[in-house]
Image (cartoon, helix red, strand yellow):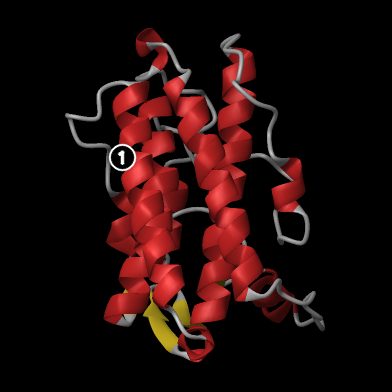
Amino acid sequence: MQANPAGYDELKRLGIGRVPAVTVGDRGAHGWNPPAYAALLGIPYSAALKLPPTELAKRLDIILDSTQALVRAVPDQHMDWRPPERNRTLRNLGYHVFRLSLAFVDGMDLGEFPENWLLDQAPPDLRDGAALARYGALVRGRITGWFEGASPREFERVIKVYYGPQSGHDLLERTTWHAAQHLRQLYALAERLEITPPAPMPVDAFQGLPLPDALW
């Protein structure tokens, strides 16, 4: 989309506010959404079984822990570097992982999940990797506390999400793979900048998640 800014106008015409998205004629689907893609193409789709909420919660915490450790290792001079693939700094990418994860809890508490939550930028006080990692620790604490108090029926509730109604289970799965996808990107960018991660990427935590093959 950066190479074709006019594409945003086409998405807005179809009622889609942001990328990624797929369009076919006058119809479109937002995000990495295989069932919606299949519907656009008129082909059957059989989804894989979702991991249970307790397992997704464990995977999300592992992903957030790895994000904390990695952003803490980013030198200050690289925090506001923007890769050519996306108009988002390293600092904002790290912040986004934590914010989108916190948004799951906020959405479950409020019963709705507006799109603008995912557009938040890192506040000025989160200037360096250490500050960003401390914010991540607060987010992890909030999420852990929420899961400890959540009953199994919480994940059956339907939440008004900006791309359509979703069960709590569906929203948790999307949140977990969304965070995982950005963690993959952070590791790739760290390698590009010759930043040594404090630990290997937790690929085991990605097993069973509907991650796209493409990194960007």
Q: Quadrant of the C terminus?
A: top right
Would you identify the image quadrant in which residue 54 lies? bottom right
Q: Residue furthest left?
A: 124
Query: What residue sits right under mark 1 in the picture?
Result: 135
Residue 21 visible from this viewpoint: no
Secondary structure of the residue carrying numbered label 1:
helix
| Residue 193 placement, left or right of 97 | right
Determine the residue positioned at 69% across, 39% down.
202
Percent of width and height locating residue 149: 40, 76
Determine the residue positioned at 65% across, 66% down.
55
Determine the residue positioned at 81% across, 81% down.
46
Determine the residue positioned at 57% across, 12% down.
195
| Residue 16 placement, left or right of 127 | right
Which of 179 and 12 lies nearest the eye of the viewer?
179
User: Compared to 6, does 87 lie above or below?
Assistant: above
| Residue 110 placement, left or right of 40 | left
